Image (cartoon, rainbow, N blue to C red):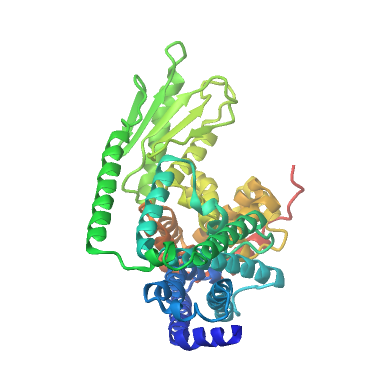
Amino acid sequence: MTGTLLRKELQQHWLAFLLLALVTFGAVGLISFTMNMRGVSGSVFMGLLVVFWFILPPVALLLSQRLVALEFREKTQLFLEPLPLPRWRMITIKYALGLAVTLVLVLGALALTAFFGRNSEVLTPRFGAILAARAAGWGWFVFSFFFVTGFFGRYRFLFFLALGAAYGLCDHYTNFRAEQFGPFALVDTRFPYESTAFPVPALRTTGLLSLGLVGLGFLLGLVREGTVGALLGEKMSHREKMFVTAMIMAALITMAVFEERKKRAPFDLPGATEESRGTVVVKVGVPLDADRRRGYAVAARAADELSALSEYLSLETLPPVFIVLRPDLDAQHFERLKLEETSDVVVRANFNAAAFVERDFLDWLVREVLVARSRGRLELERKRWVLDGFAVFWKGHAQAAAPLSEESDLAARARRGAANAFSPADLGNWLSFSKKVGEEDAKGVAWSGLRTLARRHGTEACRGFLRAVLSPAVAKDARATWHDLLHPVTGSLETAAGVRFDLFFAEWQEELAALPAPSPAP
């Protein structure tokens, strides 16, 4: 009887399964082809995230629609009720078949992507197992979620709207971040690059959530006909649709009203010293009982520095900068206070201390301003090496074409950091590389890359590359992700500087090899 029911499901839905496979694998092929045409040299699995984020959920929704929702709406399950077949077995077959199709699509997409990138990606067995575990976990969760919602029938899309509104409220008013939680952490931006550690906590959370969804799905599916199951399977009446629409409109209006009330006055430092250079505004707050002369100088120098940065990178605007004196802070330590709903840069430093080094502070401030302007996206791993390198490169950018050895300290750090088989994969796994060699040596390596670009291809080529990576201001929504996917760092190198990545990296290795042998790290 089980085999008969399975054949019935396959005969009824085989065409839908085939179309979903064509859509999924076609999307993988199209994205891989586009990335190759654009000369992307990063991980080939970066494009697979688009499939997992934007293709797989609609696919799972359609699967649940075919396997569950249509059965209840058209009451075709009534033909199975008189058969000597337990209802739990019928639901199990539907769930197992849908999950099997989902996993075939997910793992097939992974295998197809690996095939397209076989010549450019180093895919070790462990890396493959990590990718497969992440992909399978995400596929299991997504299908289980839509399998459960398939039993909601007439109220399914209302549930989706309510869930979306709840997510928006949590994201806006709390510190909850979905991309760091359970199944969503499996397909975050580290997916294409994490090749050593299994995401055990995320896999555990995903497994528990998926099992809970499976249990809820069986609970709803085992409700006897004539009660909840039958009611949910019916189409919504015109009156119900009007009521739901009115409720949604009321919720949107209520959220808009509360949003207006929630807006705060812009941050400011009353009585602060202000220096402005065009669109650059710097304010320094000093207590009334403290010496203010150093504060005036810091404000002027910071404004000059940020104005030069704005011109060098062609930045249309920079967030206002507020510098607060904190006498109890170590002179060589600086703090940035992150404010909600604003990109204003508020920092604290003990600039009146004798040991305060203004140059170190300005270099640190430049980096923080760029991070704030990008809403933190420059700290994503695929761009991080450019950011870290620029934070060091900026101080001596006027002599960018000079030999690396003229900066003896930075050159030693660069050679020491690159001594352990530095490879292109390290740029995609920059946080791991930085942890392995040390943060300061990693910055030296990144600095040497930017100096190599300036020396071998000219300062304007280097400047164009830095503008392409560090300057774009993107919205705080899905457009930012699309922008990053369509403008990878390696692609920006070719389009903005006119240099192929493989050629650039070979030149980088040559510059590093020409440096004197490194001394042990202090």
- Residue at the spot 51% in from the left edge and 71% down from the top edge: 48
Residue 68 placement (x, y as % from top left): 45, 72
* Position of 126 relative to 522 (above/below): below
In depth, the one of 159 and 355 nearer the eye is 159
Q: How many marks?
A: 0
Which residue ends up furthest to the top in the rendered image?
289
In depth, the one of 464 and 261 nearer the eye is 261
In depth, the one of 271 and 103 nearer the eye is 103
Is residue 313 at least partly visible in the picture? yes
Which quarter of the figure is the C terminus placed in?
top right
- Residue at the spot 29% in from the left edge and 47% down from the top edge: 251
Is residue 42 at least partly visible in the picture? no
Q: Is residue 149 left or right of residue 248?
A: right
- Residue at the spot 50% in from the left edge and 80% down from the top edge: 82
* Position of 80 relative to 64 (above/below): below
Residue 385 is drawn in which quadrant?
A: bottom right
Residue 125 placement (x, y as % from top left): 71, 72
Which residue ends up furthest to the right in the rendered image?
520
- Residue at the spot 43% in from the left edge and 80% down from the top edge: 23
Residue 404 placement (x, y as % from top left): 60, 54
Which quarter of the figure is the N terminus placed in?
bottom right
